[in-house]
Amino acid sequence: MVLNCKHVWKEISNYIDGTVPPELRDSIEQHLANCRHCAAVLDSTRNILYLIADERTFALPVGYSERLHSRLQNAINTEEADP
Amino acid sequence: MGCGWFPTGQWSRLANVISNERSAQSMSKDSPDGRDKGLIARILGGERELFHELVRPYEKSVYFAAYSILQNEHDAEDVAQETVLKALRSLHTFRAESKFSTWLVSIALNEARGRLRHERLIQFDSVDAIPDEDSGDFTPAVISDWREVPLEALERKELRDMLRKAIRGLPAMYREVLVLRDVQDLSIAETAAALGVNDGVVKTRLLRARLMMQKVLAPQLNIGRGGLLGMFKRRAGGSWF
């Protein structure tokens, strides 16, 4: 199967997730081997996903967990006092 | 090709391995799902203190589910707390055929949407809902080369702010999917269940969300000689697709 750039872009998200069928994956990789633009689109998309998945990008507010469990404990105590 | 952190072919094979491992794990008695169901039975039996243990692995997911909609740390934390309390009160209604984590995230999403409606900001979501999910071509930023961005660069506040701003700029329907799937690492099926849509809708929104991020961020990150200092120039906007 010969793919053009638009076909590759439409499948790029599924390709990153590894959910494209083997035959399509081979065709995509054949295209990528010969198209530096699509290879750069793939690499940039994939690396941006790495950056946003990094814990330093989206950190929880300081003390979030403590406040959450403190409030939860109050609710549990109130429940027990007033079942 | 393959000038990023992983060569292209290796990445897809790695993704398959991770996917298979996750599938195998989900069927194990020691899986998070099995652990949760055991805890839930004990909590409903009267051991209420165990609710702390039940929600602890998911408190981050709850926060970011709320944040994906509210885009405000204070409101997201408030909604996360409300979500956990609501889950405690209504745990008896939880149906074992779904995952507890998915149920919890669904509550967070609904609570956050409720908060947004209450604050009369929902009109922004209505505008966001306009894009037709099934039609239209999309054009990523076509760049001739991709300059690697080392993870150490995340220490720079400017880069983190740039990433957050790009996510904030997404229409809500795409932002929610991206945060659940790519920030929180939920599976496609888990994301679909949390949002109450099917897998195909998640995949379509995810494709668009990822390419929107690429279109905004790649040109800014791909400044050759200027290094990371040069990447903060705002590229002129344009239509996504």
Image (tube, coloured by chain):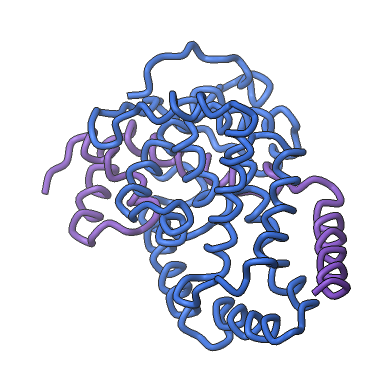
Q: Colour of chain A?
A: purple
The residue positioned 75% from the left and 33% from the top of the image is B156
Front-most of B220 and B50? B50
Residue at far left of view: A1
The image position of residue B12, as x and y in percent, is 38, 58
Q: How many marks?
A: 0
Residue B30: which quarter of the image? Answer: bottom right
Q: Describe residue B126's horizontal placement relative to residue B138 as left or right.
A: right
The residue positioned 50% from the left and 38% from the top of the image is B175
Query: Quadrant where the C terminus of chain B lies?
Result: top left
Residue B155: which quarter of the image? Answer: top right
**Is the residue A37 above or below the residue B25 in the image?**
above
Q: Describe residue A76's horizontal placement relative to residue B224 as left or right.
A: right
The image position of residue B47, as x and y in percent, is 76, 83
The image position of residue A49, as x and y in percent, is 52, 44
Q: Which chain is blue?
A: B
The residue positioned 53% from the left and 29% from the top of the image is B122
